[in-house]
Amino acid sequence: MSTEPLLSVEGVSYAYLERYRALEDVSFEVARGERLALLGANGCGKSTLLKILAGLIFPECGSYAAFGEQVSEEKLEDEQFSRGFRSRVGFVFQNADAQVFSPTAREEIAFGPLQLGLDRDEIEARIEDVLAMLEIEDLAERAPYQLSAGQKKRVAIASVLVMNPELLLFDEPTAGLDPRARHWLLELMVELGRAGKTIVFASHDLAELEWIADRCLVLSEDHRRLGDGAPAEILANRDLLLQANLVHGHTHRHGGLVHSHGHERGHH
Amino acid sequence: MIRNASTPSWLLEGESAAFPYSCSGKRRRGGAVEKTLDGLAKVARQALMSEEVAARNGLLQRLDARAKLLGVLGLLIAVGLVRHIPVLLGFYALTLVLAAASRIGLPWFVRRVWLFIPLFSGLIVAPAMFSFVTPGEIVLPLGHWFGHEVGLTRQGLTSAGLIVCRVATSISLVVLLTLTTSWPRLLSALRALLLPRLLVLVLGMAYRYLFVLLDAVSEMVTARKARTVAGRKDGRRARAVAGFSGGALFGKAHSLSEEIHQAMLARGYRGEARTLERLGFRVADAAWLAACVLLAVLTVGGDRALGI
């Protein structure tokens, strides 16, 4: 395994409409095969950071390198670079409705490989494999409006996995899913991690963190890097979690005893 | 009890200004704007759900979408050229036979077609029936105007009848095509035969997101309804609310479109749409096409033979 990081983010800042700050001087690296969780409260910049990693928006200052190459708007205009980058990076959006835009699930799954110019027979074969893997064969010819939120999420994931990317980005992967779909998705992420995929996902859910992440990067509400470490280490640092607004202090009564604790990790 | 320092005390107590919880006998129905919005959402959804018909195992459903599209186009041209009402009626009867063979309920099919007629042709042909637009033999006198007899003329009625029959038959053919072909297949056919890919991609997406925005509309209307307390009708306010809703919907559509574009870019889209074609042309399709062409030629030829 090479020691060079797969992703390298250096002093990245970003603001929407040049006014609304979303990221402030954020730096970190991601090793090949690592599973990194981006933690932070709503609006701290997790989604913005993922979009920068996906080469969809570009930092106003700082630099971002992926697979040993700097990624910039100008470089992505180059056809070969763009194809190389897009085929290596898969992005599962939080809003499956935005991602599933084709008339049928099958066409949706075919979209990515078709744009990259893969061979038709190869595409057909891959679609069948992905449909079987995600157990959605019976949804292939359905229109998106006939799918439930969980089914749409599966189609969105299938449409990314079919491109076999090295790096998978998930934005709030389990948001809006029922417990069964949620468990299925977390298991899939674990399996993909085991298969050697590098995974970066945004979340504010601390419950299953140790199961699906090797490392956590915590963003503060003022859009800066607040902490970086193994899940157990981060979860044990209550002050850090309180500062990031990921847990809140809570006072209540057990019989005659009044006590105060955080709300993290299944406490009541 | 959980108590947040910023929770106002009145929220923690029962509502003191509680409204009486019984009927007073005074009723109020929803405003016209609300009803229209809600109705639009319902009608559009019902119309689009007709895809269920496209999945039935009927005659036209079994044909390749390209063959169907071309065949219907040929028949439409023939209908446009026919100049005799009986020939058009014959053609119309044929669309009914095709509808029945395609397992489409006839009363529903007829209703669906004739719903459009007053809208598309009724208003246009109505003046043509009168003697002051189409002079000729008056069959139904309506009175006198400046010394001239005014009424419906035979010539006027014939030309109005011709237009109505032509429109009804044409709409029947188009409805047959759209009812028996699922939208994705119709798009594939358009792509394969006529339209540029980008345009077809846009059409496909417009259809796809119609549902998302329909949901947004009905959610907005429902949310408003949930907070509307019976009171006096206020048309101006209702129009203002419809305006806000329209604006909010536009905003939603805009941010959604930005995200969709990003989702496309993320999967390698570079301005040139490539799509999966899954159409199969078989002997039955060739037979259908041949039958359509033959029928079109025979009808137009026969119609010409009948004279003007």
Image (spheres, helix red, strand yellow):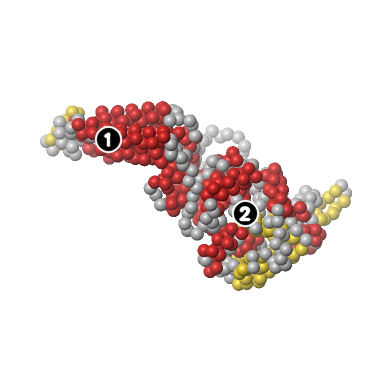
Amino acid beneath label 2: Asn
Residue B285, position as x, y percentages in the image: 40, 36
Q: Residue at x 65, y 48 (%)?
A: A176
**B85 and A214: which one is in front?**
A214
Q: Is residue B176 above or below residue B235?
A: above
- The image quadrant of residue B146 is top left
User: Residue A234 got which mark?
Assistant: none
- Residue located beneath label 2 in the image: A164
Q: Which mark is residue B297?
A: 1
Query: Which residue ends up furthest to the right in the rendered image?
Result: A256
Foreground residue among A191 and B290: B290
Q: Nearer the viewer, residue B40 or B202?
A: B202
Gap between marks 1 and 2 measured at Cα: 54 Å
Disc 1 on helix, strand or loop?
A: helix
Q: Is residue A31 above or below residue B94?
A: below
Residue appearing at x 74%, y 65% in the figure = A227
- Count residues near mark 1 (Cα–Cα under 10 Å), then give few for <14, some for 14-19, many for 20+: some
Residue A210: give x, y in percent of width and height: 77, 55
Residue A132 x/y as whole percent: 63, 43
Specify the subunit that label 1 lies on.
B
